[in-house]
Image (cartoon, grey):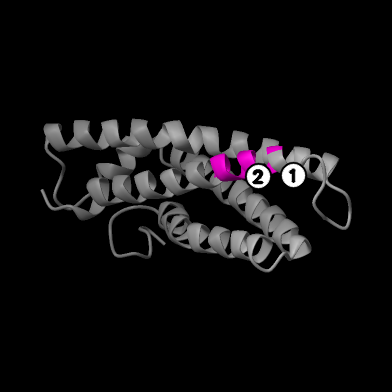
Amino acid sequence: MEYGFLGYRSTFMLDFVVSALVLIVPLLLFSLYSVKLKRNFSLHKKLQIVLGAVLLVAVTAFEIDVQIMHGGWQNIVNQREIPLTPEQFNFARNVLYVHLVFAVSTPLFWATTLFLALKRIPNPPAPCAHSKLHQKLGWISTIDITLTSLTGLYWYYVAFVASA
């Protein structure tokens, strides 16, 4: 497939990750609902492990696609039918830089939260001495992935959807 599946001149992997960004926040909210309101600690644990693994694989494939297969995001954006003006291109770059702050910190927070939970929370999962720290790290991770999603979606809009 030459271009992505969302109808813009991006790549398949870029469109895949953008779609994942739309799905990740509701799935994460469902995971939080399952643990906070339903007190289903096992489901929460399983969802977090699956979400983390899927995102790790997707982002790795995405980076290989963008950096190795296409030589960087600039080359992908330059495929637009209507090219970005230099001002629009610089704006897209700045939006990407903001996105990268969250995109880089998210896996670090998520991995830390998951690693400590797997190490310190009993199996089967239940409230314990680590719960307070886990909740703080979990909310930081949740806010971070939400900001990653919002800034990533905005970058896609600026880079591919907004007309010149």
Going by the image, does 120 lie left or right of 73? right
Q: Is residue 134 above or below residue 31?
A: above
Q: Are marks 1 and 2 in contact (CB under 8 Å)?
A: yes
Q: Can you give x and y, in whole percent of width and height, for residue 132 in the image?
A: 70, 41
Q: Which mark is residue 30?
A: none
Q: Can you give x and y, in whole percent of width and height, for residue 41 in the image?
A: 76, 60
As measured in the structure, the alpha-carbon distance from the residue carrying label 1 to the one carrying label 2 is 6 Å
Q: Quadrant of residue 44?
A: bottom right
Q: How many numbered marks, from 0 up?
A: 2
The N terminus is located in which quarter? bottom left
Q: Quadrant of residue 88?
A: top left
Tell whether position 134 is magenta: yes
Instruction: Identify the residue under disc 1.
Output: 131
Going by the image, does 146 lie left or right of 162? right
> What kind of residue is marked 1?
Ser
> What kind of residue is marked 2?
Gln
**Judging from the image, what secondary structure is the residue with disc 2 in?**
helix
Q: Nearer the viewer, residue 100 or 7?
A: 100
Q: Which mark is residue 135?
A: 2
Question: Residue at 84% across / 40% down in the picture?
Answer: 119
Magenta-drawn segment: 133-141
Tell whether position 138 is magenta: yes
Question: Residue at 50% across / 63% down in the picture?
Answer: 26
Q: Main secondary structure of the magenta part?
A: helix
Q: Nearer the viewer, residue 52 or 130?
A: 130
Q: Is residue 3 above or below residue 89?
A: below
